[in-house]
Amino acid sequence: MRLSKKVVSRTEELIHDGDYAGALALVDGLLAGSPQVPALHWYRSRCLMGLHRHDEARQCLAKVLEERPNFVPALMVRVKLARDTHERFDVEPLLRRVLVLEPERARAMYWLADTLLMRGDGHEREALALLDKSIALAPDLLKARNRRADFLLATAREIDASSEIVTDDKGQRSDKRKLEAALADFQFILQHKRTERAVMRAANALLRLGRKQEAAQLFDQMLEKIGGNDPKRDTLERLHPQTPPGHDAQSTASAWGGKLKKALKGTSPQATALRFAMQIYQAAFEPAPGLRKVDAKHLPPYQRKFADQCARALQPLGFKCLDDAEAVHLSERDGQPALMRIFTHPTLGVFIARAYPPSLRQRLCGQLDTYVEGMAMLSNDVFVGVCRSSRDVLDFGGKAYRLDIVPPQAPLLEMVKRQRKHLGAAWKEFPGVHLIVPQDLTDLEEQWVRRNSAKKAHRQAIDYVTEEELRRLLGPQFEALHAQVDALLEQLVQGRLP
């Protein structure tokens, strides 16, 4: 059966006007009499996409592609659906089929490149070539330019024999050609769509190239456009290249120690609760001298299974596996290997997947006490984290604002989004910080040691009371203080000490 031009025209008109419900009613009426027409299922899938009924849209697209496997619009919509909903669906075969059928479809090239970069594992060269070609075919495809620029900026510290090296004020060496190429893309984006993100990225590239005056001009342009009461103003002024450099690790720890000592004075319930919180979470202050690379086969089965689950969840979000490692000090403290799988993201930092050994009760119930710790390490100044947990886990110290608690059922993408608040708080509190994206385990270990050294220094600046002393001091009130602890820690995180 062929659809009449009148029906097609009316359906297209309704979809174009955003009346997806009206178009769906029209298509469903036709499908009742002709359920085997692929064109009707195609129109129905578009209506369902517009109504955000994604599961039904997948079913319709499956019927379309079963009858017309080389129908490029349906292939592209199926890929878009998977990307938009972060579905665990391998889009690579569909995109490669599209490029066989239409070799110059730029958006398919960009999507395939993005997929390959998420996957890592040696696909970076092909992905970069695809991005170059897609941009050559569609210069105004800003998302492709942004992806290429992000990749070049994130990998600029990967230096080889042919690299032209440039060193920034912090002594970090980068590949000059990569920084200049990334900067060119960000500048092109700014000419067409001036976003704060593109401005910040361009300024970052300029600072790493040593072009402070140009970076300052970008910050000045942003400051001119925002109001005097805009919360971003303080952040931008602190990030301005002319501001003094950030605190070092020791001075940061000392500053936190001073704030906490002031908060701990007295015998008020708030001060006591804060001391109690420190006692509960004092393990967060333990130093960790380093990481040691391990073979994945040495991980216990429950840890390996958990790490594999995390890998499948993190891969669609752009993370790639950096290595499997052991936190040496934690192993010594706990009496068993503290093994973890480490993932990196070009723009978000580091995530560590670690499975804690199950207790006897958990073994009997078939449960595992596990969490994913997200680490965004900001130069030498601040460590910010996010946690996905099956129990309440707080990390708390001179270098840790907080591991934000996210319910186990929450999507990992939501966990990443919630990190932005903490990054913003870090940028407001400390001038000149930037995100660390380690390229190998050695690079990560340096940041790991620095972070935990700051925690140790911070811990030494504070007097602790033991749990036994607190029980003796507080008596029946000891357990009641639990409710106050989290609220006080949240105040501490936000700089609103009692």
Image: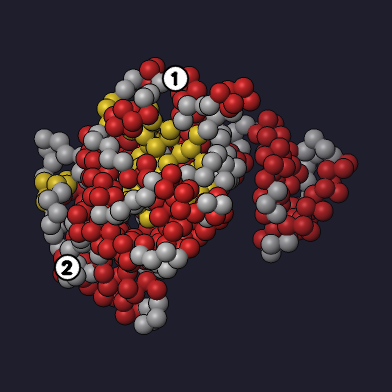
Residue denoted by label 2:
244
Asked if the residue under mark 1 is in contact with the one under mark 2, i.e. CB atoms within 8 Å, the reply is no
Q: Position of residue 129 (x, y in %)?
A: 32, 39
| Residue at x 20%, y 43% (from the top left corner) | 157
| Residue at x 52%, y 26% (from the top left corner) | 358
In the figure, is residue 435 to the left or right of 16? left
Residue denoted by label 1:
300
**408 above or below 5?**
above
Specify the amino acid type for callout 1: Pro
Q: Residue furthest bottom?
A: 228
Quarter the C terminus occupies: bottom left
Q: Residue furthest right?
A: 33
| Residue at x 36%, y 62% (from the top left corner) | 264
**In the rendered image, is residue 402 in sight?**
no
Q: Quadrant of residue 85?
A: top right
Specify the amino acid type for callout 2: Pro
**In the rendered image, is residue 364 in sight?**
yes
Q: Position of residue 37 (x, y in %)?
A: 77, 38
In the figure, is residue 48 to the left or right of 100? right
Q: Quadrant of residue 170?
A: bottom left
Q: Secondary structure at mark 1?
A: loop
Q: Which of the two discs, 2 and 1, labels the residue nearer the N terminus?
A: 2
How far apart are labels 2 and 1 at the CA level? 48 Å
Q: Nearer the viewer, residue 391 or 444?
A: 391
